[in-house]
Every structure is written in structure tokens, then in C-alpha cells.
Image (cartoon, rainbow, N blue to C red):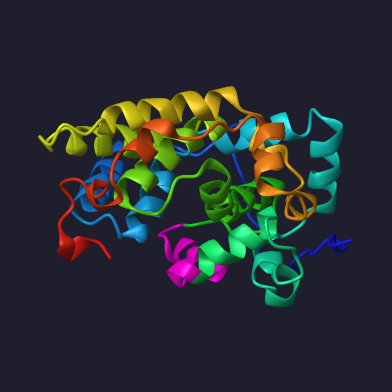
Amino acid sequence: MNAMSPIVAARRPEVEFRRGETMRLQPIRAFKAVSRLMADKEDTAAVFELMRALSGNSISKGYARLMKTARGGRIAYERDELNDRLMDRRWLESFAPGTVGAAYLAHMDERGFTADGLKQISEETRDSQVEAAHPLTWYGRRLRDVHDIWHVLSGYRTDALGEACLVAFSYEQTRSLGFRVIAMAAGNKFGQTKNGQPYRAAIKQAFAGGKACAWLPEVDYPELFAEDLEAARARLGIKPPTVYLSIPAELRDGVFTSETTH
């Protein structure tokens, strides 16, 4: 089997949540962050700024939902740290061709990404609490670490449109307002491109896809990585992003210029 014993980080800082374990919405901070992101789609730090500003009670509600199912309760009890697994190359290389794990490794290698990249940027976010020792921050880390796994499962690539579609998909999975704001802002910017491509329809389909499929925060990812990718998509109810795929790859960055993409 490819599953491993739970990986639990030790000696994390403590954090206290007040007022029902929610985070205050910060609209001015969110506006500045989304403005940065629309100017440069590679500004991942702006994404974390926006998510911190608009997280609200989405994390506490998501964690409560996780605890309501047998599988989710077990996953929460084990407190598996996905980032540590995803940085274990020997583990990733153990998955057979065609599996979710093999597709994830190919996705990361093709782009020169590592799971630690998102982790490091999230830690640098002002007043970030994501690395604290608390069930809610563990759940927040889980949502951060599944981002590229969801790229693989959903079929959305890492061009500007693919990222916009994935955050639309992710909004329906997490109900985090930051994801919706990014998707809507990107849709408006793509709407400025008068080339006849169905950018907004692609984002709309992504919202619908994220709502219609299984609830992915509850998935046991170490087990999923050993599963055939197409079989996993079918089981989870993830349908092909047909509108996105109908747009030529060279046009999926829309109004984002060559200076702000790679």
C-alpha cells in the first residue's frame, strides 16, 4: 500500500480564536490585494493576502462540516500534514503511471513547483496564523496544500484562465469569499478581451462543477493518490472542463500580458 502513517508537525505556536472562532473581514485589505493580483497573476502573495482578508467564518464552518462525517472525523483526528507528504519525493514516485499521485508529480515537475512554495508564501502573509497549533489552522493548511491536487483533479491548468476557473471551483468547495472575489474579478478582466472566446462561460462552468461534485476537503488524499486518475474523477463526480478546454491554450491568459505570465 502507498498509504503512510499520519504525519503530525510538532511544536507549533499556539493561537487563540475569539468571537466564535471567526476572522474579521477586511475589505480595504482585500481590495488592495485583488488589485495587485489583477495587475500580476503571478503575485501569489496577493492571493494569500486576499484570502486572509476575506476568510471570515469559512474555515470554522468547513472544519465543522468535516467533523460531521466518519471519514472526516478520522482525518481530523489523525491531523495528517499534507505538505509533508507532498514534499516526500520517494513517496510521490511510488505511484504507478495513470494514478492521481503520478499525475500530481508530473504536474509539479512540469512547472517547477513544490508544495513548500505555497507554504512559504502563506507563512509570510501579514498576521498569518496558518502554522499555529489549532484544529482550524490545520484545516486551513489542508485547504492550502490541496490546491495543486485540485488542479490535477479538475483539469484546469495554471494559465490565468485555469487559475480563475480553479478558484471558482474552490469557492463552491470552501465557501471562502476570497475565492469568489478572485474569480469574479478575473471574469471581468477577461471580459475586456474581445476575441470571441467564452472566458466567462468557462468560469461559470467551474462554479457549477465545484458545486456538483463530491466535497473534496473530506477526501483521503494518500488513498486517492493510488487511484486511477480518470476513475477518481468519475467517482468524485468531477466532469471535464469542456468550455475551458475549448479555448486555445495560447489564448487562456487573455488580457494578462507576457510580462506578467510565464
The quadrant in which the C terminus is found is: bottom left
Side (left or right) of 58 relative to 162:
right
Q: Considering only vertical position in the picture, is 78 above or below 62?
A: below
The reply, left or right, for residue 69 in relation to residue 259 is right
Q: Main secondary structure of the magenta part?
A: helix
Relative to 55, residue 141 above or below: below
Relative to residue 160, is residue 82 drawn left or right? right
At x 31%, y 42%, the residue is 30
Q: Is residue 91 visible?
A: yes
Farthest residue, direction bottom: 90
Magenta range is 110-127
User: Which quadrant of the rendered structure holds the N terminus?
Assistant: bottom right
Vertical comparison of 121 with 220: above or below? below
The image shows residue 161 at horizontal and vertical percentages of 32, 44
**Front-lying residue, 202 or 8:** 202
The total of numbered circles placed on residues is 0
Which x, y percent locates residue 40? 22, 57
Q: Quadrant of residue 225?
A: bottom right
- Where does residue 215 sit, x and y in percent of width and height? 66, 31
Residue at 33% of width from left, 53% of height from top? 159
Pinpoint residue 133: horizontal percent, then vertical percent: 69, 58
Is any atom of residue 119 visible in this view?
no
Locate residue 136: give its quadrant: top right
Quick check: is 156 in the magenta stretch? Answer: no
Which residue shows up at 73% across the image and 77% down it? 90
